[in-house]
Image (spheres, rainbow, N blue to C red):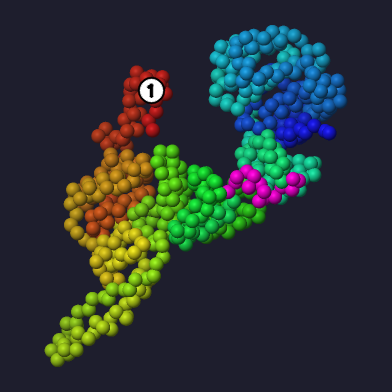
Amino acid sequence: MEQYIVSARKYRPATFDQVVGQHALASTLKNAIATDRLAHAYLFCGSRGVGKTSCARIFAKSINCLNPGKDGEACNECASCRAFNDGNSMNIIELDAASHNGIEDIKSLIEQVMVPPTLGKYRVFIIDEVHMLSTAAFNAFLKTLEEPPSYVIFILATTEKHKIIPTILSRCQIYDFNRITVPDIVAHLQKVAENEGIEVETAALNVIARQADGAMRDALSIFDQVAASSRGKITYQSTIENLNVLDTGYYDRLLDAFIETDPTKALLIFHEVRRKGFDAQFFLNGIAQYMRDLMLAQSPATSKLLDEPADIVADMQKQAARVEPKFLYRAMALCNDADLNYRQSSNKQLLVELTLIRIAQLLSPSPIESGRGEGPLLPIAKSAAPQATPAPTPAPPVATPQPAAAAPQPARPAATPAATPAAAPAATPRAAYTPGTATPRTGGTAMRVGSLSMSGHRANKAEGEAATQLAEPVTPEGVAAAWQAYIDEHPTDYALTRIMLAFKPELVENRYQLALDVANSTLLGASMDQIIAFMRAKLRNDLFTFTLQTIEGELPPQFWNERRVFDHMLEHSPRFATFCRDLDLKLL
């Protein structure tokens, strides 16, 4: 019985043409061999599983080939190539720096450098995970790396180039390996499946490729795992079950719930996902990724960034056409905020549920479309419509008072309730807020069982009453209190609230103004409509507003924020700058 070999080893590339996803880099190395323009030291950088060590071995075999092709490829037939393929070449030495990272290991390697090749032109030393070498080992290696014998070539490989000291980097030719794209991985897996006689669905290979995250070795390992459980036929359903991947159908259903502004439906989908064993944070990140894909699908230019086949991209474009970009941006922001707060939350399930409710309310009719709780929430559970309260009796005409006609007047209210049933809310939708104008308010939204309302300032009014406008007196103290209330109710908007803590509107010539520099003015201006609407509700005055005044040049010190103070101290205090650099202190 033939011994089983995993696909990651069985299908490891043996020539440059077999390397997947690194065509430009492989072409450069082949040209260097064909023109005999070889450097004495190379550094191959890139994430795991992209072919760094494989390319180093192919490169080492090719430069020692006795009969290389015109394109720089090894012949795989000469004595040197056969020795390499059999694993007993004396001219190619590999060192794992993760387990041999001390100065004694480097001294042993330097001693081997002095031995010339027995077959071929060069002795090639491949040092994998070179960033794991100790500082002393790096320093002992410097001189040899800079001026090795003419028959020695070093190939260093690393996944973390930033950990390598600059003196090593300056002595090497650096090649950065790209993450392998999803189409390239899918194409290679299809060839593997054909060779192995396995029937596969393209959708299943796309799931495997996305899970591999740009690493071909990971993709082959996942392929073996799924193939072992599928018994010769890899389907989409078996793949998502084996890899515990959440089907996009759940996210499509969630989008339906969000468009329908139905938080109940969204919560039921979340609990269905939880029953299947998926982690709440995994589900939260999946929503953010889904919204991001919808955002990319809305434009033909950015839809190319979706690593998906054409049919899936077409489906994403249909879904993306159902919502506005503003909804997607805010939904992603809410998911990101929830992800940041997930670790600190004591009730993680409630955090995700609250996020779903907020996203479901983004499209609800509200003068403040923020999804942060300021706007009126739709009913969580739909109940029977309550009986409408009869509208008050309108005042009699003033133009021609007639004493004789006043007697039958009390009979008129009996006909009024039939003319004002529950159709009033549908007939008076809330108007969108426009900067610089008073926000019309529908009068008298009645409180119902099972529903929440956060803007019912005139809850005692009956439904159907004509719209009124709030205009209570505004004082500087009230403005300051409303300003602080907004800060207190938005603790996660760090950048915005820091600006609001440093700058406050002031009454100048009967108008409230806010003086800011250009950068802070731009950031606060993006949320200005939301802030004004919030303060109008707090001040109970629909005419309140304030204007932004941009200050050219540098602000005086009394208006500096924490960042400006910190930068000023770094610039003018060398000792403080040294202290921060030594302790790696940063202002968050």
In the image, 322 versus 279, the foreground residue is 279
The residue nearer to you, when weighing 177 against 437, is 177
Q: Which residue is mark 1?
A: 580
Q: Secondary structure at mark 1?
A: helix
Residue 401 picture location, percent across and down: 15, 86
Which quadrant is home to the N terminus?
Answer: top right
Q: Is residue 194 left or right of residue 300?
A: right
Residue 28 location, x and y as percent?
71, 30
Q: Is residue 269 above or below residue 227?
A: below
Q: How many marks?
A: 1
Give the quadrant of residue 182.
top right
Q: Is residue 366 visible?
A: no
Furthest residue in direction left, as rendered: 403
In which image quadrant can residue 536 be found?
A: bottom left
Relative to 546, is 518 on the left or the right? right
Mark 1 residue type: Cys
Instruction: Locate residue 473 relative to residue 274 in the image: left or right.
Output: left
Q: Quadrant of the C terminus?
A: top left
Q: Residue at x 81, y 27 (%)?
A: 74
Where residue 452 appears, as percent x and y from the top left, is: 34, 59
**Residue positioned 30% across, 43% down in the render:** 500
Position of 55 relative to 236 (above/below): above
Segment colored magenta:
231-246
Residue 533 to residue 211: above or below? below
Give x and y (percent) for residue 45. 62, 27
In the image, 397: left or right of 18?
left
Q: Callout 1: few (<14), some (14-19), or many (20+) C-alpha neighbours within 10 Å?
A: some
